[in-house]
Amino acid sequence: MTKIRRRELLAVLFLASGWATWDLSGKIVHAYEVAISPTDPQLGDTIAVRVQPNNPTPISAPTVTVNGVEYRSFPLSGNRFRALIPTNPLDTPGRLVIRVSGEEPTRNLAVGLRNRNFRTQSITLPPDRTDLGTDYEFDRVAEFKTLVSPERYWNGPFLRPSQGRVSTEYGVRRYYNGVFAENYYHRGVDYAAATGSPVVAPATGYVRLVGRVADGFELHGNTIGIDHGQGVLSIMIHLSRIDVNAGDFVAAGQVIGGIGSTGAATGPHLHWGLYVNGVAVDPVPWRFGGIE
């Protein structure tokens, strides 16, 4: 086999694998190196896509696209980048196609998203509790969930925000007055404890949302939203009191308020929701494994 034919064969193999291609001079150009974790994700997991460019001085961050949705990547140490892909109980389990594109040849990878069984509850609401919430409240919370700050403030695993018992886990599905809520899942973890029990920040970040019942937060109750950076946000609702102000920088473990039953709550508890790129994910893996 001639050198030219061998080079052509190598080009076909590289292109088929998605690892490299040829530039105009005939030189092999390597594609991004990509690592995905967890390698066997299930519904509710946050998938971290870490990208290592071959260029030691990349000009721009690569773009990560999953099933047609683009996610921004952010720099890590060691000339690496990382994008966070949220999943939730309403997603369809199966094959996810992850596309990494930018200055280097595009990489296409696939990962299987496993199904997961979520508990169901039946809730009966009186007529006067079926239409809670104000436009002001919904607009403030929706705006908060769109935040994607460029800096990362968290470091290591997240902390448990309350020492109360877990009363409702993430992902629970519900029937309301006998009708299954197709688009509902419990978007966080509930911790039941006595009114006034301390609530702490699960990770470092800026307080970007403070909402009070007196201002129209009739569904969420007294609310605190913390921006942990790079699209990772905590929202704490039903509080009895708020000990911080909008704009405050809080440390992991700092007391920020107290457990309560304000808003649509049947008893004193903290609801902690963790949002990644606007989607409520399971907070538990963030507490026990952490995400770089």
Image (spheres, rainbow, N blue to C red):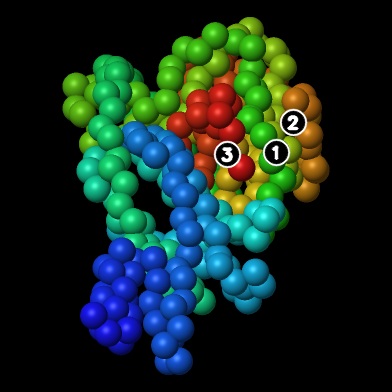
Mark toward the start of the polypeptide (1 vs 3): 1
Classed neighbour count for the residue bearing mark 3: other residues with Cα under 10 Å, few (<14), some (14–19), many (≥20):
some
At 60% across and 10% down in the image, what residue appears?
164
Q: Which mark, residue 291?
A: 3
At 23% across and 36% down in the image, what residue appears?
182
Q: Is residue 259 above or below residue 129?
A: above
Q: Are marks 2 and 1 in contact (CB under 8 Å)?
A: yes
**Viewed as shown, does residue 181 lie left or right of 259?**
left
| Residue 148 x/y as whole percent | 59, 56
Q: Is residue 114 above or below residue 52?
A: above
What residue did someone put label 1 on?
Answer: 155
Looking at the image, which is closer to me, 65 or 183?
65
Between tags 3 and 2, which lies in front?
3
**Secondary element type, mark 2:** loop
Q: Amino acid at mark 2?
A: Ala
**Secondary element type, mark 1:** loop
Tell me the quadrant of the picture where the C terminus can be found. top right
Q: Amino acid at mark 3?
A: Ile
At 46% across and 83% down in the image, what residue appears?
27
Let me know if residue 193 appears in the view: yes
Question: Which quadrant of the view contains residue 53?
Answer: bottom right
Q: CA distance from mark 3 to mark 2?
A: 15 Å
Mark toward the start of the polypeptide (3 vs 2): 2
Classed neighbour count for the residue bearing mark 2: other residues with Cα under 10 Å, few (<14), some (14–19), many (≥20):
some
| Residue 247 x/y as whole percent | 78, 48
At 63% across and 7% down in the image, what residue appears?
194
Q: Residue furthest front?
A: 1
What residue did someone put label 2 on?
Answer: 252
